[in-house]
Amino acid sequence: MHPNTIQRVQASWARVQPMADAAGALFYRNLFAADPALQPLFRGDMAVQARRLVQMIDVAVRGLGDLPVLLPALRALGQRHEGYGVQARHYDTVGAALLATLAQGLGEDFTPEDRDAWAEVYGALAAAMQAQPVELA
């Protein structure tokens, strides 16, 4: 992963932080609008789930500079998600919901270059969660 890609993702994520709770809630609205069949996979308080999601993304974004440390945690997270019923096809829907959330939340501050960087990073993280090889360079 190119350092510029990491920098773009980290900088745009820093702009999301002040609206983290709203971003988490918006993500789930986008996700369930894209695929209502995913809603039963989530149990409990969705506000709590949204905060957990934002915290998980924060950990991942901060860890982008040290992928060899981040990858085992992502693989473990992917195994847990598999146990919840998450299927490989769901990763595309999640990625689209994430990009839509960032675009909605950041507006014009979410540039095409930022979108491309997030798409690349999400692809790598999703691959790691599915125990697929991830390009470290």
Image: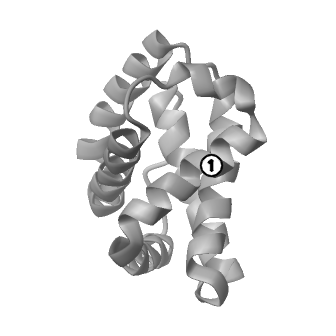
Residue depicted at 53% across the width and 28% down the height: 132
Amino acid beneath label 1: Arg
Tell me: residue 96, above or below residue 89: below
Q: The C terminus appears in which quarter of the rendering?
A: bottom left
Q: Visible in this render: residue 95?
A: no
Image spot of residue 129 (x, y percent): 46, 31
Tell me: residue 75, above or below residue 100: above
Residue depicted at 37% across the width and 34% down the height: 45
**Mark 1 highlights which residue?**
29
Residue depicted at 46% across the width and 55% down the height: 24
Image spot of residue 88 (x, y percent): 65, 23
Label 1's element? helix
Tell me: residue 18, above or below residue 135: below
Q: Which is nearer the eye, 102 or 91?
A: 102
Residue 96 appears left or right of 4: right
Image spot of residue 113 (x, y percent): 65, 80
